[in-house]
Image: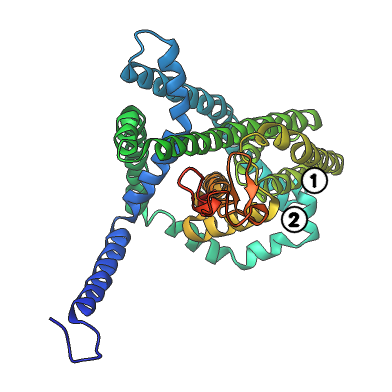
Amino acid sequence: MSSSRGGVPIRTIAAAIGMTLATILALLLIIETRRVLVWAAIALFFAVALYPVVDWVEQRVPPRRRAVATLLVFLATVLLIAGVITAFVVPLVREGGQFAQRLPDLIRDARNGQGPAGDLVTRFHVDEYIERNEAQFRQALTGLGTPVLSVIRTAAQTVVGIITIFVLAYLMVLEGPKVISGGLALLPPHRAERVRRVGADCAKTVTGYISGNLLISVICGTLTYIVLLIVGVPFAGLIALFVAIADLIPLVGATLGAVVAGVSGFVHSLTAGIVIVVFFVLYQQLENHVLQPLILSRTVRLNPLTVLMSILVGVELAGLLGALLAIPVAGVVQVIVRDLWDARRGQPKPEPTVGEEEVPVTAVQDSGPDGQRIADRPDQPDARRS
């Protein structure tokens, strides 16, 4: 059934309306389930990173069962994360308690123009500003206890999200071979092998980025802690922890950590501040020209423009999480695009050829001894597909 002569068929109009409604419903579904989708994306990210490790354990640890290998890898991951957290939390709690005990003395010395911050308070008239706005500060501090329920709800959602991500990642790694095999079985053998190869390269990119970035952050935090201890800056553990975490953020993280550590050093003493600034200038050269090329060059090969653009897009889409995942996602996209380009490049050839010797078509005579065109012979390859 169609409309009047020359008009658009009703079936086409109905199909367009149906596609539009389906797209709107899909967008609404994504908006309503965006939190779950973010959890699934993070779980997939970590599953891809741990997948090669589970494969390696499965091949070398008896009884070579996927469930046992997955359980061992995830238990080792949990223990590793717990060990790192413990290594940071113990000094964090200790120095945090010391800071809380010294805080009244620091405030009193600052008001009297004494101590490391006293000179800054007096020079910039911070004490006068605090006195003029004491009522506003008191009101703000009083209101901090109001949104307790919101804080509890956020904390509960965070815990639920972490557990959900962990379970999803575990199931993805455990059931991954079955899902991948079932999906590849639907493809022709040559294309299935290509997809498998590209997937392995993507997994290598993600795994290399995570392990490399964590290693670089640990090195940065450790060296910062040593320098802060040498120059005598208080709360060196807290500052080094912040620097290590900030260094996980591409491009701006190291600068942010350097600013915080430098300010803490100048508050302590002029000499300490200068030493810390010199250290971070030298360390940035070490990280940019030695550590990153050595650790990440074999896995994530992105030029600076691609890195910056991917981070900006990631921050716009998902905030801090987007900044952390931007580079590995860009690396995966680069692997896929490069494979598509390599597969497409040269087809069709700039100059088609025929025969096993790949003789150019332009150099072949129009006809052979039997009068048949060589390019049209059944025993010759089709020049258009060479």
Displayed quadrant of residue 171: top left
Give the camera-side residue of 253 and 53. 53
Give the residue furthest to the left: 1
Reply above or below: 357 against 385.
Answer: above
Cβ–Cβ below 8 Å for labels 2 and 1? no
Q: CA distance from mark 2 to mark 1?
A: 14 Å
Give the camera-side residue of 11 and 60. 11
Work out which quarter of the rendered image holds the N terminus and state it.
Answer: bottom left
- Residue 106 is situated, as x and y percent measured from the top left of the image, at 68, 43
Give the camera-side residue of 65 and 308. 65
Q: Is residue 132 left or right of residue 282?
A: left
Mark 2 vs mark 1: in front: 1
Q: Residue drawn at (29%, 55%), measured in percent from left and top?
A: 33
- Residue 24 is situated, as x and y percent measured from the top left of the image, at 28, 69
Name the N-terminal-most of marks 2 and 1.
2
Find residue 202 and name its label: none
Q: Residue drawn at (67%, 49%), measured in percent from left and top?
A: 251
Type of amino acid at the residue the image marks with label 2: Val
Give the camera-side residue of 113 and 196. 196
Instruction: Identify residue for label 1.
Output: 266
Q: Is residue 321 left or right of residue 120?
A: left
Displayed quadrant of residue 135: bottom right
Way the structure is coloured: rainbow
Give the residue furthest to the top: 62
Give the residue furthest to the front: 370
Instruction: Identify residue for label 2.
Output: 121
